[in-house]
Amino acid sequence: MKFRTSMISVVLLGCVLPLYGQQAGPAFRTLPSQCLGRPGFPPSIATAFCKPVLGVAQPQQASNDIVRNDGSGTYTTFDAPGAVNGTFAFAINPAGAITGYYNDANFVGHGFLRAGAAGILATFDAPGDVNGTYPFAINPAGAITGFSYDANFVGHGFLRAVDGTFTTFDVPGDLNGTYPSGINPAGVITGYYWDINLTSHGFLRAPDGTFTTFDVPGAGTGSFEGTLAFGINPPGVVSGNYYDANFVSHGFLRAVDGTITTFDVPNGTNVTTDSLSFTPGLGINPSGAITGTYFEPIQGNPFGGNYRGFLRSRDGTFATFDAASYPPCCIWTAGLAINPAGAIAGVQNDGFNVNHGFLRARDGTVTALDVPGAGTGHGQGTVADGINPSGQITGYYTDATGVTHGFLRSH
């Protein structure tokens, strides 16, 4: 059962991506028809590796904010203009600018940027987008990266500059999609791409457009095996995981000089993405601390064990944690994002497939985050997936009617 869940997570990674310090990614349920069974097909040979153009931008509008306070913080909830089937916020920068996407009536995604004290929302589509634009990372200057789907649901990377100009790109050697996942203050982008055999490889894209590709030693070379790069911090250190030939996942850290350190959480296995909300973690902060999720096998547990959160410090030591535990059996905790102070935002599942966000302070104190208005039914609840240096948290929640909205939590 656990193997099957992890397998599905990897097949869907073309749809779920995180970002540096403020990292995270979307829930699988928002893109079922676009991702499941469609890991990607070779793009047209006419696709250029890099082509700067202007995307399709919509007029800026003030978001329809609703402000609530639950005693632990103030929540501002919002919907992107044109959102019919949900607004999904993923990344927040130090200034409080938020990016993510919203689904239209056909469940096609469009990017948005929410910025300024008035919560002005600008929406956009990347050049060449046929089946959706999905931004997942924003740096301090406001540059955004993500991917868009072409007619064959193959992903192509994009960089949206502060002035709204787009550069689209495909990693050389990509035959089944390029999926950026993080961008640092210097504009270096990291992510992964799929080759002709559906093996994944990590990449770095420098501000001048040059690429560096890499594979973790020990990564498998079969379909849905390989290297998945997710987070990048200001110095350029990359975090991610890789799948070996036995389809077991392990964490890695790639230093600026290219040196790769692999790791497994003590007494655990499968350093992985959050297999329940399909939200990858493995966020990294400026000092090199990483948060993520791992599986801990437990004899006699009805599901074979628990998913637990971890914090790996710069010196390689680990702290493991559970945001909560529920009867009758299981713990499902995912650390998704970590800020410079070491505060972690994430999601925990209550055992009945209801999501609850959490904030784990540096001292280990955990605060539950449930957006007022979040539903309590199957597949509903709160996902906290981005946190900035001042402790502002972004994410999304699904209400009792099944509609998803973005949120910003402030102190």
Image (spheres, helix red, strand yellow):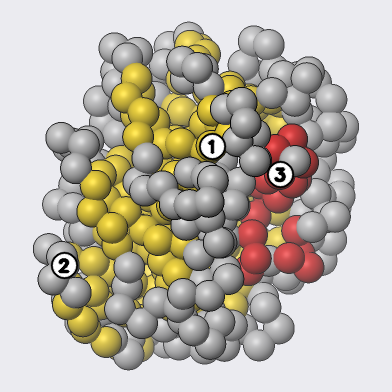
Q: Position of residue 223 (x, y in %)?
A: 84, 32
Which of pointers 2 and 1 lies earlier in the amino acid sequence?
Answer: 2
Can residue 31 be seen? Answer: yes
Can residue 123 be seen? Answer: no
271 sits to left or right of 387: right
Say which quarter of the image contains residue 402. Answer: bottom right
330 sits to left or right of 132: left
Element at badge 2? loop
**Circle 1: is it few (<14), some (14-19), or many (20+) Cα within 10 Å?**
many
Q: Amino acid at mark 3?
A: Thr
Q: Nearer the viewer, mark 3 or mark 1?
A: 1
Q: Point out the image quarter for the N terminus.
A: top right
In the figure, 346 relative to 252: above or below?
below
Q: Which residue is mark 3?
A: 5
Q: Position of residue 191 (x, y in %)?
A: 56, 38
**Structural distance between the alpha carbons of marks 2 and 1:** 29 Å
Q: Which residue is mark 1?
A: 306
Residue under the image location 50 percent in, 65 percent down: 354
Q: Amino acid at mark 2?
A: Gly
Q: Position of residue 305 (x, y in %)?
A: 58, 34
Q: Amino acid at mark 1?
A: Asn
Q: Nearer the viewer, mark 2 or mark 1?
A: 1
Which of pointers 3 and 1 lies earlier in the amino acid sequence?
Answer: 3
Q: Which residue is mark 2?
A: 73
**Structural distance between the alpha carbons of marks 3 and 1:** 13 Å
**Circle 2: is it few (<14), some (14-19), or many (20+) Cα within 10 Å?**
some
Q: Position of residue 374 (x, y in %)?
A: 40, 77
Which of pointers 2 and 3 lies earlier in the amino acid sequence?
Answer: 3
Q: Nearer the viewer, residue 21 or 151?
A: 21
